[in-house]
């Protein structure tokens, strides 16, 4: 994907870009996802980009790339001051996800709001296995530091990054790159 997406006011059920990966029980289902130079204007309380492996007992194997993308966390109702708490949420609770590029991601979330929101959240839970390539960080660096190193805050903003669970940091080139369109 390389485009601008506007998640309209009043959308309460989904985010701007949503991927829910699953498989037939007992079979592996490979997927390669590339989101490059995307801009999401998010007006709902859901993340602008949500990618999950939600179904217990399944074995999706997702290779993921998110590069040079931006999420604007807009007010859910004009003047309300209420915005969704997370710009990008990737949760692996079953199967596996290998994230090869999560870099140069930015967001718009006013800095005068507490708690600060927006940003990127990665989660490994359940039987899921989540590996993250090191990018510009050194091998052996903790996943939360890798995520922050590869996604510095744009000038004049704060960049919130969060990692939940025991993600494994791997050498660059470990994950499969989605082929170019």
Image: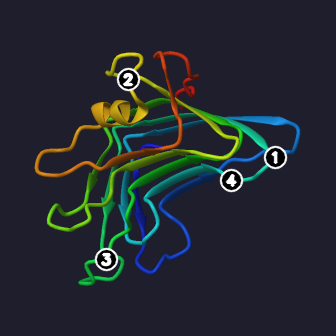
Q: Nearer the viewer, residue 66 or 59?
A: 59
Crowding at label 2, few (<14), some or many (≥20) Cα neighbours within 10 Å? some
Q: Position of residue 100 (x, y in %)?
A: 49, 27
Give the Cα distance between marks 3 and 2: 35 Å
Give the Cα distance between marks 4 and 1: 10 Å
Q: Earlier in the sequence, mark 3 or mark 4?
A: 4
Query: In the drawing, does residue 136 fall left or right of residue 114?
Result: right
Query: In the drawing, does residue 15 fall left or right of residue 73?
Result: right
Q: Which mark is residue 14?
A: none
- Secondary structure beneath dot 4 equals loop
Q: Earlier in the sequence, mark 1 or mark 2?
A: 1
Q: Earlier in the sequence, mark 1 or mark 3?
A: 1
Q: Position of residue 4 (x, y in %)?
A: 38, 54
Q: Which residue is mark 3?
A: 82
Q: Which residue is mark 2?
A: 141
Q: Name which quarter of the figure residue 76 lies in.
A: bottom left
Direction right: furthest residue: 26
Give the Cα distance between marks 1 and 3: 36 Å
Q: What residue is rendered at 45% in x and 81% in y?
A: 10
Above or below 80: residue 157: above
Q: Which residue is mark 4?
A: 54
Q: Which mark is residue 57?
A: 1
Between disc 1 and disc 3, the foreground one is: 1
Above or below 150: residue 77: below
Direction left: furthest residue: 156
- Give the quarter of the figure containing the C terminus: top right
Between disc 3 and disc 2, the foreground one is: 2
Q: What residue is rendered at 27% in x and 83% in y?
A: 80
Give the Cα distance between marks 4 and 2: 28 Å
């Amino acid at each position: 994907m390389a485009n601008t997406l506007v998640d309209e006011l009043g959308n309460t059920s989904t985010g701007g870009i949503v991927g829910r990966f699953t498989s037939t029980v007992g079979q592996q289902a490979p997927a390669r996802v590339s989101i490059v130079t995307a801009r999401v204007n998010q007006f709902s309380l859901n993340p602008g980009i949500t990618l999950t492996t939600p179904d217990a007992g399944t074995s999706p194997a997702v290779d993921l790339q998110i590069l040079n993308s931006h999420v604007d966390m807009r007010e859910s109702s004009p003047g309300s001051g209420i915005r969704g708490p997370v710009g990008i949420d990737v949760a692996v609770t079953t199967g596996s996800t290998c994230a090869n590029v999560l870099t140069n991601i930015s967001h718009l979330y006013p800095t005068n709001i507490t708690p600060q929101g927006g940003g990127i959240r990665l989660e490994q839970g359940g039987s899921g296995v989540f590996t993250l390539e090191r990018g510009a960080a050194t091998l052996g660096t903790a996943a939360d530091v890798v995520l922050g190193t590869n996604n510095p805050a744009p000038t004049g903003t704060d960049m919130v990054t969060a990692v939940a669970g025991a993600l494994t940091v791997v050498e660059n080139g470990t994950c499969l790159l989605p082929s170019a369109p």
